[in-house]
Image (cartoon, grey):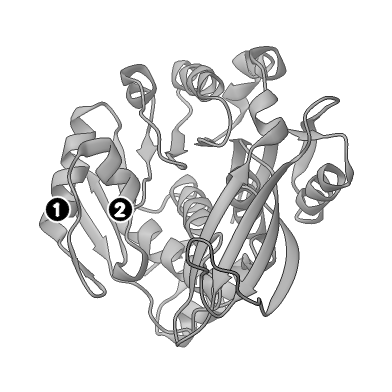
Amino acid sequence: MAKKPKILVVGSLVKDLTVITEKFPKPGETVLGKSFRTASGGKGANQAVQAARLGADVTVVGKVGNDDFGKSLVASCRESGIHTEHIAVDLKAPSAVGNVILETGNGKTANRIIVIPGANMAITPEDVAFLKNAIQDYDMVILQLEIPMKINELVAEWAFQSHVPVMLNPAPSAPLSPGLLSHLSYLSPNEHEAADLTGIAIRREGKKANLEDVKAAGNFLLTKGAENIVITLGSAGAAAISRSGFFFQPCIDIVEPKDPTAAGDSFVGAFSLGVCTGMGLAEALHFASYAATITVSRAGAQPSLPTLGEVEALMKSQGSTCDGFMTR
């Protein structure tokens, strides 16, 4: 790679508190869990860490509380080489926490997550005002919806005015304004978020998604202003829809899933890096799918995110290559 892409992530940092159980409790039921662990996470921080581990020069803008969780969240970003000088400390709100229940019984793996946003929702326009001029220095901006919508709208507008591409991962699901949509280069919902945004349910049969539904949802979102739509489909793969065509990537189903936490963030971080380095949509889908595959085979959010060397090794083992970030 001749030059590291400069990626700006404006988003969330969350401390994940994970309980592992053989089955989800029913309403009113108590079950005995298998184990408990903590890990640094948050969609913004996860996507930043993934892009950094794959070779990007990453800066995070966000906010944590003045507590031990906040200190560990910032430290985790630094350990991946991320610039953290623009992560502010809020003296009133606590750091965000994620309550993760991970079910690993009966040959299946699933999770349920509740996020208490804390300091993430305390980010103000004043906290990000410096970006109005500084944003032009970046090759890509990545956003999510675990921070105030107004902040996303401001940052996307400034990036658009500076001709910097914007990736929005619309999670957790929420309505998006026409103005925000018109400023996006990439919109990457999962199948459920795509249905919420379009009213088009993506039907499935086992691990196969109805691709006509995927196309319909993607084309609908194109009419709303975003330039490229990337829909992740879990075990059914991923697809990209643009005015130049439709691209589908089957799931890289070659590992034993252990924990799906951060798999979507891994995909978004890897895909964003890929397009920054010159990959086309199909190539970026392929590359990001391998990164996400490694992530689901490991436990925890940021601890599960792979390095470029690990992604390259897995691709080569399957007959794919990643030469200079260009898949073939």
Please tell me the numbered disc located at residue 230: none
Kind of residue indicated by mark 2: Glu
Q: How crowded is the residue under tag 2: few (<14 C-alpha within 10 Å), some, or many (20+)?
A: many
Residue 133 figure quarter:
top right
Q: Where 326 sits versus 115, above or below?
A: below
Instruction: Kindly give the residue lying farthest to the left in the view shown.
Output: 212
Query: Residue at 26% across / 26% down in the picture?
Result: 225
Dot 1 or dot 2: first in sequence order is 2
Q: How many marks?
A: 2
> The N terminus appears in which quarter of the rendering?
bottom right
Residue 313: x and y in percent read 55, 80
Nearer to us in this view, 314 or 69: 69
Q: How crowded is the residue under tag 1: few (<14 C-alpha within 10 Å), some, or many (20+)?
A: some
Residue 84: x and y in percent read 78, 38
Identify residue for label 2. Answer: 191
Residue 63 figure quarter:
top right
From the viewer's perspective, is 36 left or right of 188?
right
Mark 2 lies on a secondary structure that is helix
Query: Residue at 15% across / 50% down in the picture?
Result: 215
Residue 15: x and y in percent read 72, 51
Residue 323: x and y in percent read 49, 68
Mark 1 lies on a secondary structure that is helix
> The C terminus appears in which quarter of the rendering?
bottom left
Q: Where 8 sits versus 156, above or below?
A: below
Residue 197 figure quarter:
top left
Identify residue for label 1. Answer: 213
Kind of residue indicated by mark 1: Asp
Task: Report how far apart the C-alphas of labels 1 and 2 lie in the structure.
Answer: 10 Å
Query: Residue at 51% across / 83% down in the picture?
Result: 105
